[in-house]
């Protein structure tokens, strides 16, 4: 089948979270299965054309919005066999960040920016004659495509037969904007109703996308169940429940071409489940890099995360000093986000030299080093649609310490102290107390039950969350979306 992805992010070109990993990896696996796939995304100013071999492709391309016509150019690049098309608009994408400025203030014209991206993606399909069987859109940024296909393109010779699949990567972000953008977006005021786009007087991009999509999914089975509840549905649970069996969870895959200790060229030494000697080297080098005490017998807990409340880092902040005071353990922390959390974690090495090391910012190299060199990896998320770092950790033999929510609950098997079975340590209560005692449980296992540690490491490294498995589930979802599209 022909599949068009329209998304705000895609690895390796632009990334803020797991959405980009999915859009970068899934099309390649679908293509390998024999499907024809294209990806459409913005050409942000930070995307280096020379580095990624971008080529001018098409333009000027006119994009009709609701009350005006916009113009753009299109560039293209090859992402391991998948054509990626970049919508170039100085007006909308030539600026510092993807969604917000350097002070983390959302751009006021975000509804226009991503409404335009969505319309441009559909227009590009028409201009190049790519007749999609499915248009796969992601989060609020491009959710409007499911509505546009039914409102504007129901009898279009190129787009008229296209079904839509909307993937929700994080339901907390919904794209709520003032109603006056309706005219520009061209959604027709008849759709500004509580059962479609209207949300307490504002437009809700994701809400309308859910209503109009032929199929909706999220990125793990547990998160699909959680988002049907008032607690984690963020106001959209009734609309998801209305979709019934047409709202499902498909677990994200893991890109083992990039995250595999046997082939990883970034880490100090490579290793496997049969020979962990390289992991000991990685641990020593990680201790050096983060200014930790050079002691092979002290466990390291790794953190690679956005430093925001959703990730539960405020819970870790409340107890981390008590942990290093009461336990013989080290922390290697990498992350950025909330300025208060950045300041707190950034100052810890000065107060706990040799026990806590931190790097405020992001470094792909350091992320790989932490996954390879740490003994444990902590993710105390308040909610986690899927999560990828716990999957990386499992492959690297770095046992996850996670809150049992969303994809974390789906991918980590609880340690059984009686048998040594399991692949990590899970807790349920979203509290600093639970974080403290679960880290303590992991640390005591490290010192007191080393045979269980070895058993868990082997089990963890044997886990398979490959994209091939997930891609097969997405094909089933596409087929269901097409059936839904044509059954009426």
Image (cartoon, rainbow, N blue to C red):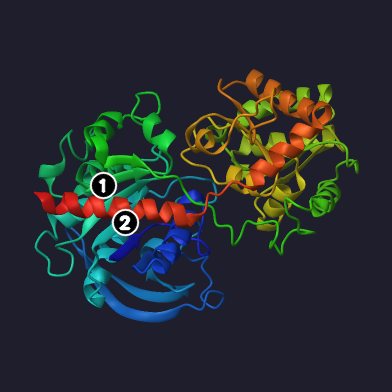
Residue closest to the eye, 251 or 232: 251
Horizontal arrangement in the rendering, residue 54 relative to residue 91 (left or right): right
**Please, what secondary structure does the residue beneath circle 2 have?**
strand
- Percent x, y of residue 3: 30, 64
Q: Is residue 185 visible?
A: no
Counting from the top left corner in percent of width and height, residue 361 is at 66, 49
Characterize the local packing of mark 1: few (<14), some (14-19) or many (20 or more) Cα atoms within 10 angstroms.
many
Give residue 215's mark. 1
Label 1: state its secondary structure.
strand
Q: Earlier in the sequence, mark 1 or mark 2?
A: 2
Would you call the spot at circle 2 few (<14 residues within 10 Å), some (14-19), or many (20 or more)? many
Confirm or deny contact between disc 1 and disc 2 (CB under 8 A): no
Q: What is the x, y in percent for residue 397?
A: 70, 45
Residue ID at (30%, 32%): 236
Q: Report the number of discs.
A: 2
Rendered image: mark on residue 234: none
Horizontal arrangement in the rendering, residue 281 relative to residue 394 (left or right): right
Nearer to the camera, 262 or 369: 262
Q: Position of residue 122 (x, y in %)?
A: 25, 64
Farthest residue in the front direction? 419
Mark 1 → mark 2, Cα distance in angstroms: 10 Å
- In the rendered view of the protein, which quadrant contains the N terminus? bottom left
Residue at 30 percent across and 43 percent down: it is 206
Q: Residue at x 66, y 47 (%)?
A: 461
Task: State the mark number for residue 136.
Answer: 2
| Furthest residue toward right | 294
Residue under the image location 17 percent in, 49 percent down? 484
- Tell which of 361 and 297 is nearer to you: 297
């Amino acid at each position: 089948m022909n599949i068009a992805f329209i998304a705000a992010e895609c690895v390796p070109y632009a990334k803020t979270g797991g959405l980009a990993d999915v859009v970068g990896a899934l099309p390649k696996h679908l293509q390998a299965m024999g499907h024809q796939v294209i990806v459409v995304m913005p050409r942000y100013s930070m995307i280096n054309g020379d580095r990624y071999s971008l080529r001018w492709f098409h333009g000027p391309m006119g994009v009709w919005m609701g009350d005006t016509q916009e113009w753009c150019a299109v560039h293209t690049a090859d992402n391991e066999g998948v054509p990626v098309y970049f919508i170039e608009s100085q007006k909308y994408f030539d600026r510092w960040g993807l969604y917000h400025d350097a002070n983390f203030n959302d751009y006021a014209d975000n509804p226009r920016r991503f409404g335009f991206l969505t319309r441009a993606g559909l227009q590009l399909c028409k201009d190049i004659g790519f007749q999609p069987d499915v248009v796969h859109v992601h989060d609020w940024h491009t959710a409007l495509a499911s509505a546009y296909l039914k409102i504007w393109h129901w009898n279009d010779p190129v787009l008229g037969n296209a079904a839509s699949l909307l993937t929700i990567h994080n339901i907390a972000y919904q794209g709520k904007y003032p109603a006056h953008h309706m005219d520009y977006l061209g959604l027709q005021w008849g759709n500004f109703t509580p059962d479609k786009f209207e949300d307490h007087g504002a437009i809700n991009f994701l809400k309308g996308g859910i209503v109009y999509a032929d199929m909706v999914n999220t990125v793990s089975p547990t998160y699909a169940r959680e988002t049907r509840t008032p607690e984690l549905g963020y106001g959209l649970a009734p609309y998801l429940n209305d979709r019934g069996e047409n709202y499902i969870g498909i677990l994200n895959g893991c890109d083992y071409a990039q995250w595999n200790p046997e082939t990883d060229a970034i880490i100090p030494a490579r290793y496997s489940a049969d020979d962990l000697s390289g992991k000991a080297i990685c641990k020593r080098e990680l201790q050096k890099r983060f200014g930790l005490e050079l002691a092979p017998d002290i466990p390291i807990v790794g953190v690679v995360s956005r430093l925001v409340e959703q990730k539960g880092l405020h819970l870790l902040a409340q107890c981390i000093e008590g942990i290093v005071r009461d336990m013989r353990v080290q922390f290697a922390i990498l992350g950025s986000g909330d300025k208060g959390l950045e300041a707190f974690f950034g100052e810890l090495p000065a107060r706990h030299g040799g026990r806590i090391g931190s790097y405020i910012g992001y470094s792909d190299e350091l992320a790989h080093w932490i996954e390879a060199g740490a003994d444990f990896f902590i993710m105390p998320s308040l909610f986690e649609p899927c999560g990828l770092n716990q999957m990386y950790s499992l492959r690297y033999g770095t046992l996850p310490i996670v809150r049992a929510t969303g994809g974390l609950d789906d991918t980590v098997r609880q340690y059984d102290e009686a048998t040594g079975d399991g692949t990590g340590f899970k807790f349920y209560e979203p509290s600093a107390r639970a974080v403290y005692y679960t880290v303590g449980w992991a640390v005591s296992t490290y010192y007191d039950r080393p045979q269980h540690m070895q058993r868990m490491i082997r089990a963890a490294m044997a886990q398979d969350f490959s994209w091939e498995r997930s891609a097969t589930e997405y094909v089933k979802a596409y087929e269901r979306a097409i059936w839904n599209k044509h059954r009426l």
